[in-house]
Amino acid sequence: MSSVTIKNVKKTYDNNKTVINNVNLEIKDKEFVVLVGASGCGKSTLLRMIAGLEDITSGEILIGDRVVNNVAPKDRDIAFVFQSYALYPHMTVRENIAFGLKMRKTPKAEIEEKVKQAAEILDLTEYLDRKPKQLSGGQRQRVALGRAIVRNPKVFLMDEPLSNLDAKLRVQMRSEIKKLHEKLQTTFIYVTHDQTEALTMGDRIVVLNNGDIQQVDTPDNIYNDPKNTFVAGFVGSPQMNFIEGKNLGLNENILYGVRPEKMIKPDGDIKLTVNVEISEMLGSEKIAYFNIGDKKCSAKLDSDFNIGKTLDLSICSDDLYKFDSATGERIY
Ligand SMILES: Nc1ncnc2c1ncn2[C@@H]1O[C@H](COP(=O)(O)OP(=O)(O)OP(=O)(O)O)[C@@H](O)[C@H]1O
Ligand SMILES: [Mg+2]
C-alpha cells in the first residue's frame, strides 16, 4: 500500500500566517498526482509536510494505513527529489547514487545490484564513473532520480525537479519521468508551477491557490470543466477570456468565459467588433490582444490581422462558460 491521505491538514508558520487551510486529499496507490499553483500558494509546504520535513499544525497525514505525523522523514518510506539536484561534486555518479544506501549500511552486493538497475532504468550505465561536472543538466537530474530510485520508496515526492533545465530538456525529461512512473509502478506526487507540466504529466491535478485546493481532477476535466474562474484562468495559454454579461448582451450577473481559440467561429451566434492592440506570432498561430469592456482578452487565429485595426469576433454561445460574477464559482 502506498496511498497518501491528507486529512484536514493546516499549516501555520511561526509568524502566524496560515499557508495551508484545511486541505483534504486522497492520493491513490500508484497514482501520479501533480500539485500546481502560483508561486507562494503552498505547494512545497504541502509536499514537505508529506515528507516530514515540516511539522503539521493540525490534521493527519497517512502513508498507506499509517499515520505519519510523528514519524521521522527517514522512516516514512518516501524519496524526495528537489529542484537543485545537490549531487556531491567529488563523488562519481555511482557513488552519488549509492550514497544513501551506504549510509544505511546496506550490504555491498545489494548496493551494486541496485545501482546497476537504477542506471539501466535511467540510461546512466555509461556515465557511472563520471563526476557530476562532466554531465549535462538532464543527466545530473537523472542521477538525482537514481538516488531516489535505489531506496525503493513507497512514494516519490518531487518538487519542481525540472525547473533548472532548459526548455527543450524539460520537455524530454517530462516524458522520461512519466516512463519512470510506469516502470516503477509507485505513487508519485509532483510539484510544479507550470500548467503544461501539470497537464501533460498528471493522472490527476490538484490546483492550489493561497493554501486552498480549488479543484482535484483529471487534466481533461481541469481544462474542459473548470469549477471556478481561478482554475479556468490558470490553465490554458493565453488564458481563458472573461467577459461581463452586459458586454455580450447577455445576463448582467454572469461572468462569461471563452477560450481564445473559440473567439472566431464560422457558426458563432454572438458577434462583436474589437480593436486589436497587440499581436503575437506563435509559429502556425497568431494571437490578437484587445479589450472587451475593461477586461483584457485575446483570440487565437490562423488568418492575418492588423494592429490598430478592427477585428470581427464570432462566438458560439455553446462555447461559453458561466461564472457567478460575485464568487467566481461556475454556474452549470
Ligand atoms: N519557513 C517559513 N516560515 C514562514 N513562512 C514560510 C516559510 N516557508 C514558506 N513560507 C511561506 O509560506 C507560503 C507558501 O510557501 P511555499 O514554499 O509552500 O510556496 P510554493 O507554492 O512552493 O511556491 P514556489 O512556487 O515559489 O516554490 C509563502 O507565502 C511563503 O512565504
Ligand atoms: Mg515551492
Image (cartoon, helix red, strand yellow):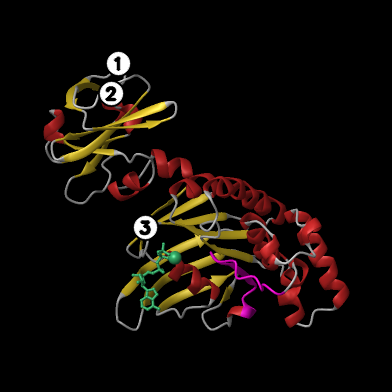
Please tell me which of labels 2 and 3 falls first in the chain: 3
Q: Which residues are magenta?
A: 74-90
Please tell me which of labels 2 and 1 falls first in the chain: 1
Residue at 76% x, 64% y is 130
Q: Residues within 10 Å of mark 1 (few under 14, many from 20)?
A: few
Q: CA distance from mark 1 to mark 3?
A: 36 Å
User: In this view of the protein, which residue sits in the foreground, 66 or 248?
Assistant: 248
Against 110, is 203 above or below? above
Q: Residues within 10 Å of mark 2 (few under 14, many from 20)?
A: some
Q: Residues within 10 Å of mark 3 (few under 14, many from 20)?
A: some
Amino acid type indicated by mark 2: Cys
Amino acid type indicated by mark 3: Ala
- Which numbered mark, 1 or 3, is in the foreground of this view? 3
Point out the residue furthest to the top here. Answer: 266
Residue at 61% x, 76% y is 76
Please give the residue where the numbered disc 3 appears in the rendered image. Answer: 38
Kindly tell me whether mark 3's CB lies below 8 Å from ligand 1: yes
Secondary element at image label 1: loop
Amino acid type indicated by mark 1: Asp
Residue at 38% x, 75% y is 11
Point out the residue furthest to the front here. Answer: 134
Please give the residue where the numbered disc 1 appears in the rendered image. Answer: 267
Please give the residue where the numbered disc 2 appears in the rendered image. Answer: 316
User: In this view of the protein, which residue sits in the foreground, 66 or 100?
Assistant: 100
* Location of residue 238 by image quarter: top left
Please tell me which of labels 1 and 3 falls first in the chain: 3
